[in-house]
Amino acid sequence: MRYWFTLCFILVWWDLGSVSGQRPIVPETYYTEEHLSDLRAEVRELFYHAYNGYLNYAYPLDELQPLTCRGVDTWGSYSLTLIDALSTLAVLGNHTEFRRVVNVLSELSFDSDINVSVFETNIRIVGGLLSAHLLSHRSGINLEPGWPCNGPLLRLAEDVAKRLLPAFNSYTGMPYGTVNLRHGVPPNETPVTCTAGVGTFIIEFGVLSRLTQNPEYEAVAMRALKALWEHRSGIGLVGNHINVETGQWIATDAGIGAAIDSYYEYLVKGSALLSRPELMEMFLHHLDGINRYMRKDDWYFWVTMTKGTVSLPVFQNLEAYWPGVLSTIGKTSDAMKSILNYHQVLKHLGFVPEMYDVQQREVRPQREGYPLRPEFIESLMFLYRATMDKNLLAMGEDVLRAIQHSTRTPCGYATVKDTRDHRLEDRMESFFLAETTKYLFLLFDSENFIHGDGLSGKPHRVASRSCMLDTGAYIFNTEAHPMDAGALDCCHGPTERDIWQKVWFPKESSETSSSDSNDDDVSSFLSSPSIEICNKPAWHSYLWVKHPLRCPASLSASKSWTGKRRKSSNFSLMTCEAAPFMQMLCVGGEVCDI
């Protein structure tokens, strides 16, 4: 068991006062609990209108066509929307429907002779199944003995992941973009893959390795990240498409948006979820280059990866996730400035288009649509948890009103083909139910179990290991599927015997652990990662990573940490170095006494 008795998964921030204080737009008394309850009810109805439309008109095909009320296969012919919507059912508390869908999916087979996107299959299918597996205990499902280390959804997720593994058999270890679910990489598949398609596996594959105790998945994901890192430019930036066999950059424009976005996101989230501080070190190195070369008046432009000169002064819808990432590392003022820029685009057009020319203040030709994307709402949710600034609730309601007014159809919600005149397109992508509706609901629902404060949880035991579930330590993958980090301790890491041995016989334990270490030594590719012990953290965030060497004899060391203390100064086995890893995840300002 790690440290979940003391974790507090709420956002405590350091630099929010100056921003929120300057914008008294929404009165503090406006968004009452009654008002928020009405908004939650509206989002709930919105979800079920789209979900029932899919079940009635599209299932078992991948997606709903909301204008013609028909179904269509898009990403692989595996009932994609049903899988993608499953974790949202759990967040909404619909346990009956959750159980029904789990029973349906338990009979699903992925042994098909079809070509699929490795990236999309991972984030939507593997991620959706793993998240549902970890949420099963909340929905009254009869769990198999040994859960969460086994179960039907876990086996299904692993079956899909195994079918993706051939994509990683490149010279560099970076994955191809397409695999056949039965035969592996197609013979004539291009070796060119986008950066996000290389660097967006560590969450799903890391969770899978920890739950199944099979290190292969996490190892291939880390090898791909390492290869990408080694091909960064001298100014710390990466391009957007790379040859996975040669490592040559094919497209050298660097940005935070399309084709790159979730690579940066997964460095931060993977660091916290899997206790890998080297990933945070990588992100901070990239962040320095991003701020130095891309950031212009709180917009982030595309630049050349080697020189840092602006190549495309545009804002993309897919970049709207960035304020959410900034909020998770404590850069709340920066995040608020950017989200206000993005909101101005939304107020101007009604939606955030796929691409907006900042200099010309107009939509870019051929990129004028809005496919019901979640990124802007995602950032609103994270920032609201950070600041409790009610202006963010108002921005979220703006999005809700636009969706209801312009995209609702008799059987679902439709993509906006053109944000200038709000013409619609006959498509409702699965992420509308997986992400957009989920983030909207969580924005208006501060009491949701996802937002747990870390002061309580549900103890769980598997053989000689223990873990703490439902503390609020949920990490979302890029498809908004939440992973309960606490559950991983039941299947991975030291047993209780190891923990006690480390407490009572630290010297012997240290010698044993050094000789028996199964770490893949990926951190060796970083140049001397900074390690701080009981000092002020290098970044202020709700995803603090710390490297303890021992429990302090007194409280003096921990007092140098900046932040509010939520509990007394006493520490237990859960907060000492007896915890499974040489890292501690300190969440929400909680000071870990180590």
Image (cartoon, grey):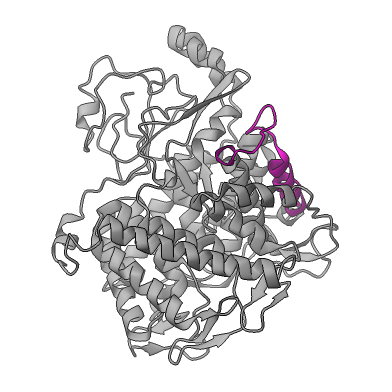
Q: Nearer the viewer, residue 217 or 447?
A: 447
- The residue located at (47%, 88%) in the rendering is 422
> Between 390 and 104, which is closer to the camera in this rendering?
104
Q: Is residue 157 magenta?
A: yes
Task: Please determine whether, in this image, residue 385 is positioned above or below residue 185.
Answer: above
Is 488 displayed left or right of 170 in the figure? Answer: left
In screen coordinates, is 232 left or right of 14? right
- Please indicate whether residue 486 sits to the left or right of residue 289 in the image: right
> Residue furthest toward the top?
504
Q: Which of these two is toward me, 349 or 139?
A: 139
Asked whether the viewer can see residue 223, the reply is no
| Quadrant location of the C terminus in the rendered image | top left
x 21%, y 36%: residue:
564
Q: Residue at x 22, y 38 (%)?
A: 563
* Residue 539: x %, y % from top left: 30, 46
Q: Residue 183 vs residue 243: left or right?
A: right
- Name the spot of residue 111 as percent of width and height, x first: 84, 55
Q: Is residue 159 something that shows in the picture?
A: yes
Start and end of the magenta stretch?
A: 137-165
Q: Where is 533 relative to 371, above or below?
A: above
Q: Going 15% across and 66% down the picture, which residue do you hit?
A: 24
Q: Which of the pair 240/403 is nearer the observer? A: 403
Residue 430 on image: x %, y %: 60, 66
- Residue 60: image quadrant is bottom right
Q: Is residue 145 magenta?
A: yes
Percent x, y of residue 26: 19, 67
The picture quadrant where one finds residue 148 is top right
